[in-house]
Image (cartoon, rainbow, N blue to C red):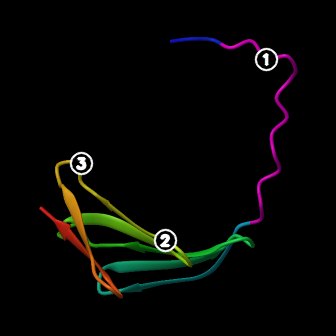
């Protein structure tokens, strides 16, 4: 553990307004569409029997969260990327 003495008080930033625009559930899947103003994203929560827990899709990024026991690999093709979970 370490400590850092700061020259002045920390002033927190005002968080952006978070607007959850839509939330639906289909066959055990939960989809939540969120608009942060500067970015929009879709959170997909999967049923427990799937090998990954949830995914977040933004306008530029896909994040897939899985068990720490799983290893992931990607294969980049010309116009697509394939994700492998082992």
- In space, the residues marked 3 and 1 are separated at their CA atoms by 36 Å
Return the residue at label 2: 61
Residue at image position (17%, 55%) is 70
Q: Which residues are magenta?
A: 4-17
Sort mark 1 into few (<14), some (14-19) or many (20+) by Cα contacts within 10 Å.
few
Return the residue at label 3: 68
Measuring from the top left, give residue 12's x and y in whole percent. 81, 39
Return the residue at label 1: 6
Q: Residue furthest left?
A: 86
Sort mark 3 into few (<14), some (14-19) or many (20+) by Cα contacts within 10 Å.
few
- Left or right: residue 16 compared with residue 8: left
Mark closest to the chain's N terminus, 2 or 3: 2
7 is within the stretch colored magenta: yes
Image quarter of the C terminus: bottom left
Q: 24 or 17: which is nearer to us? A: 17
Residue at image position (63%, 11%) is 3
């Amino acid at each position: 553990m370490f400590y850092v003495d700061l020259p002045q008080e920390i002033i927190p930033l005002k968080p952006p307004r978070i607007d959850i625009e839509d939330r639906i559930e289909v066959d055990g899947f939960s989809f939540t569409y969120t608009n942060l103003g500067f970015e929009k994203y879709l959170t997909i929560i999967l049923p427990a029997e799937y090998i990954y827990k949830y995914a977040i899709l933004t306008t530029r990024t896909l994040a897939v969260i899985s068990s720490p026991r799983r290893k992931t690999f990607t294969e980049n093709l010309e116009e697509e990327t394939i994700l492998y979970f082992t």
